[in-house]
Amino acid sequence: MKRLIELTRSERCKNCRICCRFCEEKPNLKPSGFSLKKTGEHYTCEAYDTEACRCAAYSRRPFDCEVYPFAIAKSEDRGCSLLVIDTLCPNYPEILIKLSGMDLSGLIVPSDSEIEWEESFVPLKVIAQNGKANDALNTLSPDAGFFFRSHFFNSGRLSAYGFPYHMIWTEITSYFWKIIDGSFCLFSRTGKDYSMPLPPLPYSLKACRESSRLLAVLNAANGLTIFNSSAETAGKAAKDGLTASASSEEFLYKSPALAELKGDNYKGARWLCNVFAKNAEITFVEYKSGDLEGCAAVLNSWYNHKFERTKFENELHLLKHTLKANRTALSIPDKLGLTGRVLRCGAEIAAYTFGTAISEDTFCVYFEIANPAFKGAGQYIFRELCRELIACKYINTMGHDGIEGLKTAKELYKPVEKLGVYTITI
């Protein structure tokens, strides 16, 4: 726990007006061993010196105070104990950035100070299961990227193993999780219908069957559909007597080849890059919040261009959903763990792209949006991104969703492998 406590130290703490103050007399996060006193409209810890704005018992403060904004809490479904972080702490964003580079796998956390779940909590690590079965689910928020990645990072090369793959759709889909038979199970709800957008990890037949039973309760219908399974997991499921069928494919490339674009195989893409390169004052930079308005304008131009040329209902449906997903990505990229880059011609944004690392050697590109007025901008920003990621062995550009034009475009970049995406059903 010492590593976590070190993360909580900040200059901001000296001027904080959140800690040691409570809106109710018996709060969930009340410091152990201390009582509260009424101070104006609030309650403060008896050890808190309101005039000096400091703790008078700092050297003997309880574990609760020592680790805050971290805490040990029961999950929403009360099925397990969790290490959580409280998003009410003003220092939370800074701590989360520091936390992203830490490995909590060997962390030993005492569970004797467990408290009840709060809406402001974000899970970080499952500490223990209590063995009590119930049908409640835990909410997965856009803040829970660290928690998701602790289970799925390095588990496969499919795009769905990246946290943003799911969270960019929160405008139309809600996500939940539950630990079943020691496996992390992810659930999604669109409208009233629940499904599993990923197989249990690690794969477990018992977890699949219990998830099926659970969804039968939630959907009031029998059966379970698990999407985005890798070939390996689909094989295990088939051996267990479940039905596994190929549903789509994703394109995997070697990043050095895309960074160089050498040879006849890439002459079309290389030519388009050269066309765009004729523009003046080209810059390729990290996406910042100040780029939101300019990128939104690019998105609208791209959307209108695509909308006018869309002929089929399934393409129109996907286009509208993609518009919503991009809005989410542009608004909260940091929370989602997205890497964003912007391509500029002078002061004008010509294109932007977002993606994330889904394993140590694979980066997935989720969006690449270019203003149609800038010919070659899409190819140019893709090449520049691959040049930046040249140390990353593979680039995944996802699938084609049955759109032939998109499939043809991805084939032109000569994928080194087409990853099979499978659906498992009970």
Image (cartoon, grey):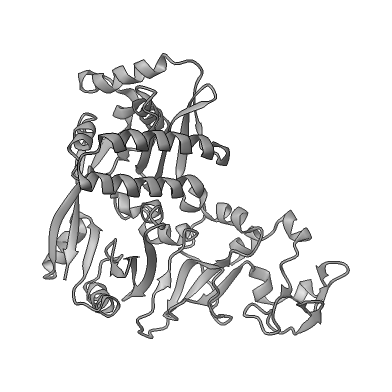
Instruction: Locate residue 237: give its quadrant.
Output: bottom left
Residue drawn 28% across the image and 23% down it: 269
Of 106 and 366, nearer the camera is: 366
Q: Residue furthest right?
A: 51
List x then y, in percent, for residue 397: 29, 40
Q: Position of residue 140 (x, y in %)?
A: 43, 65
Position of 20 with respect to 211 (left or right) is right
Asked whether the viewer can see residue 191, the reply is: yes
- Residue 390 visible in the displayed image: no
Count all numbered tags in the image, as a single digit.
0
- What quarter of the picture does the N terminus occupy? bottom right
The image quadrant of residue 14 is bottom right
Residue that appears at 36% across and 27% down: 372
> Residue 69's spot in the image, x, y percent?
63, 66
Residue at x 38% of width, y 64% of height: 175
Give above or below for 338 relative to 349: below
Residue nearer the viewer, 172 or 18: 172
Q: Quadrant of residue 16?
A: bottom right
The quadrant the C terminus occupies is: bottom left
- Residue located 47% across and 65% down the image: 106
Residue 284, relative to residue 337: is it above or below?
above
Q: Nearer the viewer, residue 259 or 5?
A: 259
| Above or below, comparing residue 255 to residue 141 in the picture | above
Check the image and report above or below for 269 versus 213.
Answer: above
Q: Position of residue 380 (x, y in %)?
A: 37, 25
Left or right relative to 2: residue 194:
left
